[in-house]
Image: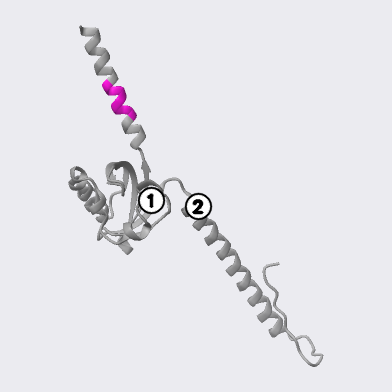
């Protein structure tokens, strides 16, 4: 039982069809409210429990909402991340390409499928992020998912280095 509605009258009354219809309508609306509340709680749980970095950002370059994965990945609090433009967290070498991608999204005719850039962590290191984004032009918002691919990038670099070393040894 989620809720109980109780109505009391001091005197016995005959059933009133209009009153019964009104009570049935109220009960239906209350039920819809509870269903919607449960659905919102479930969506919020998906948002907060996601291992990926989920966010919404304005076309102005400022994060509007971030999930807790951002704190775990970059070490900044959500307040620190939303207090300034997200471009300030992007590696200097990736800023021009990030601005170009943002401009494409702002036109509303473009979705980002796989865009990579580096974001600064609170400890001074940089994390590689791969983005998937979609604009909502009517509200000047971008909804995005980023995945930390730093370990994969580091593994690729190690494999490239090992290959070069092996090729040099083979040539010698």
Quarter in which the C terminus is drawn: top left
Few, some or many residues within 10 Å of mark 2 (<14, 14–19, 20+): few
> In front here: 81 or 107?
81
30 vs 18: above or below: above
Residue visible at 32% across and 42% down in the picture? 129
Which residue position holds label 1? 70
Q: Which residue is at the front of the view, 100 or 148?
A: 148
Question: Which residue lies most toward the right here?
Answer: 12
The residue that appears at 52% across and 55% down in the rendered structure is 45
**Residue 8 pos. (x, y %):** 75, 86
Which label lies toward us, 2 or 1? 1
Q: Quadrant of the N terminus?
A: bottom right
Tag 2 secondary structure: helix
The boundaries of the magenta stretch are 155-161
Report if residue 160 lies within the magenta region.
Answer: yes
Location of residue 152 by image quarter: top left
Asked if 157 appears above or below 20 in the picture, the reply is: above
- Identify the residue position indicated by label 2 in the image: 46
């Amino acid at each position: 039982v989620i809720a109980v509605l109780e109505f009391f009258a001091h005197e016995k009354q005959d059933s009133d069809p209009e009153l019964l219809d009104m009570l049935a309508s109220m009960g239906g609306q209350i039920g819809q409210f509870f269903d919607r509340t449960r659905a919102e709680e479930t969506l919020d749980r998906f948002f907060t429990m996601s291992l990926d970095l989920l966010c919404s950002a304005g076309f102005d370059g400022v994060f509007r909402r971030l999930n807790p994965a951002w704190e775990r990945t970059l070490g900044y609090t959500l307040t620190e991340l939303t207090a300034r433009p997200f471009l300030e967290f992007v590696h200097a070498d990736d800023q021009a390409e990030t601005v170009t991608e943002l401009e494409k999204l702002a036109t509303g005719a473009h979705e980002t499928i796989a865009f990579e850039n580096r974001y600064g962590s609170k400890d001074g290191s940089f994390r590689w992020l791969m983005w998937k984004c979609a604009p909502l032009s009517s509200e000047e918002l971008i909804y995005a998912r980023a995945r930390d691919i730093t370990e994969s990038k580091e593994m690729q670099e190690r494999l490239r280095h090992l290959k070069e070393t092996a090729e040099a040894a083979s040539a010698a």
